[in-house]
Amino acid sequence: MLNMFTHARRMAGRALVGAAALALAGGGVASAQETIKVGVLHSLSGTMAISETTLKDTVLFMVQEQNAAGGVLGKKLEAVVVDPASNWPLFAEKARELIAKEKVAVVFGCWTSVSRKSVLPVFKELNSILFYPVQYEGEESERNVFYTGAAPNQQAIPAVDYLMANEDVERWVLAGTDYVYPRTTNKILEAYLKSKGVKEEDIMINYTPFGHSDWQTIVADIKKFGSAGKKTAVVSTINGDANVPFYKELGNQGIKATDIPVVAFSVGEEELAGIDTKPLLGHLAAWNYFQSVDVPENADFIKKWQAYTKNDKRVTNDPMEATVIGFNMWVKAVEKAGTTDADAVIDALIGITVPNLSGGFSAMMPNHHITKPVLIGEIKEDGQFDIVEQTPGLIVAEEWSPYLEGSKDLIADWRKPLNCGNFNVKTGKCGGAGQ
Amino acid sequence: MTDIAIPEPTTAAEPAPAAKKELTEALLYLDAVTVTFDGFRALNALSFTVDPGEMRAVIGPNGAGKTTMMDVITGKTRPDRGDVFFNGGTTDLTKLDETQIATLGIGRKFQKPTVFENHTVLDNLRLALKGQRRALPNIFHRESAAARERIDEIFETIRLTEHRDRLGGALSHGQKQWLEIGMLLAQDPKLLLVDEPVAGMTDAETAQTAELLREINANGHSVVVVEHDMTFVRDLGVRVMCLHEGSVLAEGTLDQVSANERVIEVYLGR
Amino acid sequence: MTSSARLFRLARVLCSALALLLAAALVQRAEAQDISAALSQLTTNKYDDTEAALGALALSGSPAAAGIVSALADGKLVFGGLPPRVFIEGPGGALLDPLTMQPAADAPAVKPVRVNNRVRRAIEAANGALSLVSPDAGKRREAALAVGRSRDEAALPALEMALAKESDPKVKSAMNLARASILIAKEGITPAERIAAVELVGAEGNQDALAILRSVPESAAPEVKQAAAVAIEGIERNLAMWGMAQNVWYGLSLGSVLLLAAIGLAITFGVMGVINMAHGEMVMLGAYTTFVVQEVIRTSYPGLFDASLLIAIPLAFLFTGLIGVLIERTVIRFLYGRALETLLATWGISLILQQAIRTIFGPTNREVGAPSWMSGSFEIGHLSITSGRLWIIVFALLVFFALLATLRLTRIGLEMRAVTQNRRMAASMGIRTNWVDAMTFGLGSGIAGIAGVALSQIDNVSPNLGQSYIIDSFLVVVFGGVGNLWGTLVGAMTLGVANKLLEPYAGAVLGKIALLVIVILFIQKRPRGLFALKGRSIET
Amino acid sequence: MSMTRQPALLGTSGLIFLAVLFVAAVLVPVLNLYAAPDSAVHVPTYVVSLLGKYLTYALLALSVDLIWGYVGILSLGQGAFFALGGYAMGMYLMRQIGTRGVYGDPVLPDFMVFLNWKELPWFWYGFDMFPFAALMVLLAPGLLALVFGWFAFRSRVTGVYLSIITQAMTFALLLAFFRNDMGFGGNNGLTDFKDILGFNIQADGTRLTLFVLSALALGLGYILCRFLVRSHFGKVLVAVRDAETRVRFTGYRAENYKLVAFVVSAMLAGIAGALYVPQVGIINPSEFSPANSIEIIVWVAVGGRGTLVGAALGAVLVNYAKTYFTSGMLAPYWLFMLGGLFVAVTLFLPKGIVGTYYDWREKRRQHDDIPDEPLATPRPAE
């Protein structure tokens, strides 16, 4: 408060614009000598606060743990939290503030694709590092970004495989919110399903706007589509807020998982905490981590997390695990490079392997994505997932999907000599700005 | 002054508008005008005419339809039935909107004085002054010397010269009434409709207003004044028309009208 | 309740079970098989084994089978010990022997036998197979319907055998229908038989019948195909009409949600003229009140859960009404006559309330459950009605008429109307206008709170809840005509139905856009909304 | 009769405003380029972009004040015009990417490639040429305002009805632009811009130029608005705000005056949007969200409605507060502060900062009968 007060006084004294500039510029000089700053760029207000706030807490938790373990390179870590308020241009502005003004060594942040797209130019321009912890549509590989969430092949395709193998599904509803992740994922799935012999008329694709709340017509359509005599499943890429009314309507219209199972890619423990899960019993989700993973590493993490949040009901979820993996990878890379300098850390990160929370190890690959196991879970009455399938090995991310026309010839490899995020194997050229 | 027989409300076969055109020399011609609001007949087959250069006073109890009559003439309300013609029957007012009617030369003063409160008195007159009305040319409009002279004249007429730089909203009630009349003058209309110009005025102001209106009328403007103040109406000394339940109850000199049994019964009281 | 899809699913498993059962019946059910093999299969913790064990149990004829299957369905079947054995978890967590239902001698550490969708279906099938021999006619009928939907030729002999024995006419007609459904696509039957089947199925007239009729094989006689085509056309015409009715129902349901969201605003904005941007947050507070009530009930009085909404309604009304009064007294009352400034102040208040809730309850969704009487659905003709939606419509109308009555019939209602029509006159007649203002705003807010209770049943209970309703609410009030409660009712229902009638053609997004454009154009036609007050011009 | 003094084109506060703007436009680049990076007066580049953003917001606020403060049109959809201008600029910037997109397609933007679009939709034609894009920056919002306003004002939709349908307009556009099928990039919008008129968009020089251009646009916008409201045209506008019926009975077509003001305002908003996009690097449908438009109204109210200078000041102050509050310790509580600020301003400064200042000044010179700013304090037109 005091700080704000001085600002106000200073402002009153001078011409407005100049004072604002000085106030903005002068804020962050103090006391940064012995710490390494870690930026946290997650929305704490607005529509995305619902998902992102937990990730802010996760980073703060990891920073505390790391400091308790002696910090990094002998220095303490210091988290710098900003609130981009679910406002995409503000993400870019805050990213710039973190890097240019606060001089953070790394940023953990973003959830939506658009927020990531918004900050990308900033990270490239100022050459810093972003860890992005959410499953996303792929079709991207940037030098300054490390993707610890799943690419479509690490989530969507195994889920569909599971339904085909275990539930004999022949007819598919691809329902999503109308934005880039569902659009791309569904394009990939459509191509994949067709490659598996599913006919055009057995695929129904439906898009709804953000926050769609009246699902009566669409659920009725799904019901109708599912009564044609073939086993039907819904693949849901419906985004956050719209899920609750969607599942409530499913329950209302009496669609059970044994009739038409719904497999979701955006519904985790955090989202289920807001839903009465009794009618949802048996509906599925595909992730790379569930809180119910029964291994000691996970039990240990959950215990510490709940102690940190002083809430023994606080759940964990997949993007949290991705944040944890990213954080540990960064720490390890900094120690390997012996510096927090971005170029050195970016080079050091490739090949870094850290334990994940499902009992295995995840490695940072040259395409800046990590290897992951894929888990399929059925919703239980207590809002947790019963893991019904786990891929035997780890899956490497296909950042450029072979099922999409535009990207089937592209690969990413950030090691020398290729050092390219969109290398075209047909033309033998780096397709984008890297030539 | 021409006396036109008041048609019976039950007009079985209405003559075609073309015929009316030839019938009338009147500046304003209303025939069998009816206006209904949710079943309530505000005007009931109202008919009358106003000649060029005439001043007419309209009296009548509340709800007699005086304001609605003005609304119909100025295009604010469309009549359900009936004809309203202007300029010797050449112009059908029911087909026009407020702006077009104002441009034709009908000015109106509202019951509650309505001036532009956040403009100076001078600007109020400038805005009202006859001249360019289109939006885009007015961005670059410059005031001519003739216009300045005309405004100074009006200031003399409405006796507000020393208040010219005050905001309209800062004037007293009476001053606002005069300003509004001045604005009407600035528009230079053929016909002025004046609704209760002396409501809330002192006796001296009332007398001054009557003089003002006579002066305006003497300069060739037709005037229709709606007023309750009988002293004022007497001061005007013009033909009087009494409305009741949306039609003309009586018409003539003030004395004739005041002597009418029905008028006494419904309006003046015994 | 019964979803056709679920029945179909059940039927496929059932048919194979049925065939086996038939075989078993033919050998006169030798003796109750030993089920110990099946029981040990349940301890392997593998879904395949569990499924197989269920099949064995269904056919075993063991008297313990039904109990074991239902324990599995309830998650009460556990296993543990060395070698692993199966127990049924009794009341109070006691372990019972599944065969004898006596308490087990020892109590090893146990885990529940895991269940997934496949196992759940196997449970249903096992229950179904057991239910065909069940004395309950309803269950037999359900099984027959399921066979019909599966159209599995293998089930035909079993079905015909059951048909011969059946005496209940309802069950019999269901079995006849099932038989016809199978015969339609069967090879090698006479055209006359096939036509009879087509007619029988065609008489059903629903979506399923349509699918069955389409399965008439290409090789069928022309007159059969002709009969099928006629039947299909008839059903389609019929269903199109029902589909229209269904859309109207959806529309009314959406309309009732809009009505609930807007009705409080019709008071604070429509009657009082406050451009109340915090209205949505009042709805949100009502929803959170419901959450708190349910939390208390869950932890302390679980038996009251079904009454939780009824308890929440008055509490939400009082709480949000109180907040409304507080806002009115501290902010709004200084802003009367400056309507546009109320927009700014209430916008600020809405930000504060959102953040307050976010700080107290966290940013994530909170769980509000549905009481049992609001779950499920039923059918009228081919119209599917969900109970929750039906109750929300009823509730919205109740709230609407209660409010109307309050304004029309009560003293405070009279005073409210007096104050909003002529404040000075009302004051001079001894009405405490300050108090009436506060009460009016409180009433509007309280009603928004009640709406929140209902909306918690269909939407997220999150700090953003209010934001998603505020635009629609204003649109409804303005469309209906500011200051007219009936306008709000008609406006909400019109917009709801129009939206749902547009949706099938234009899709959810384009439909909504089209609706917004229609409202914009409509306001051009009637600049004061649907129910504008017409009258003598009141001059400026 | 003596001549009456007309208030000057720029009043005292207007001159101060332009002077501050000019000093900023000179000083910020100088301090950015020539002050030592660690000195106290150095203005880092990110602050330049931030200030540039504030200036575009100020221009946007100015456009709102023109119609709200002077004509009484409370548009809750002004953000739509801003966004349309932004999209026009964004489309130009997208076309400039050329083969540097991740897929290297010379014509199609990236988002079209991965949705398997084969050719450019017709409405993207011409946006590779800057003059065409610049024209569209004006025409797209201008035409929308013209059509919308023509309908609404002709039908005499006023007051809150008008406000709500402007909100419906921007909401409909929000939904439309969210649709990926529309061909504007859906929720992700347009981003990853490379250069503008051949200059690298991330270069310090470009940023400074954009900042100076924003200052220039704001200054010119201010002078334009000031010129308009002082003209005979502007006096009719205020008359329309205070007594629309009177204006009609005086023979003016009130709807035409409103329409001209509305279109000018929309174009100003469009210019603001076009300058905003290259400085923040993204344009996305959320700019259409009704909440954004309401926030613009709030800026104007905080600064002072009907004062022009106040609108610009309000925009800068509120956004500075937002930037300040959303960082550091205060981040979790910033909505409380912002909300509290709005409530406090309405309660204690109903005329906004500048309006209150004018009142105070008016009181001091009560005996002086020459009002400098006769339009300073509009009565609320309900």
Image (spheres, helix red, strand yellow):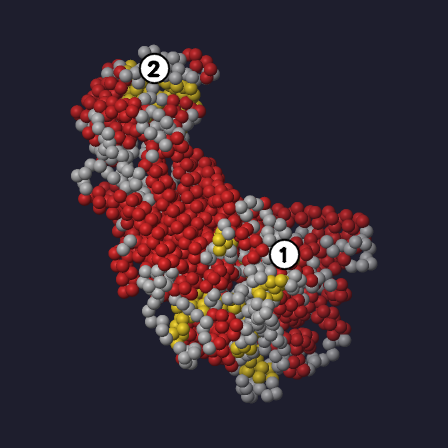
What chain does mark 1 sit on? A
Q: Secondary structure at mark 2?
A: loop
Tell me, yes or no, if residue D335 can be seen here: no
Disc number placed over residue B51 in the picture, else none? 2
Asked if residue D316 lies left or right of residue C218, the reply is left
- Count of numbered circles in the view: 2
Q: Residue at the spot x=72%, y=80% of the render?
A: C31
Asked if residue D360 lies left or right of residue D335, the reply is left
Residue A127's spot in the image, x, y percent? 47, 65
Q: Which residue is mark 1?
A: A204
Q: Residue at the spot x=69%, y=80% of the render?
A: C32
Residue D344's spot in the image, x, y percent? 29, 54
Quadrant in the rendering for residue C282 = bottom left
Q: Residues within 10 Å of mark 2 (few under 14, many from 20)?
A: many
Q: Are marks 2 and 1 in contact (CB under 8 Å)?
A: no
Tell me, yes or no, if residue D345 can be seen here: yes
Camera-side residue of C20 and B86? B86
Quadrant in the rendering for residue A96 = bottom left
Quadrant of the snapshot with the C terminus of chain D: top left
Q: Amino acid at mark 1?
A: Met
Quadrant of the snapshot with the N terminus of chain D: top left
Question: Where D163 falls versus B82 (above or below)?
Answer: below
The residues tagged by marks 2 and 1 sit, at their Cα atoms, a distance apart of 77 Å
Camera-side residue of C6 and A348? A348
Q: Amino acid at mark 2?
A: Asp
Q: Secondary structure at mark 1?
A: strand
Question: Where B131 falls versus C284 (above or below)?
Answer: above
Judge if badges 2 and 1 mark residues of a common chain: no
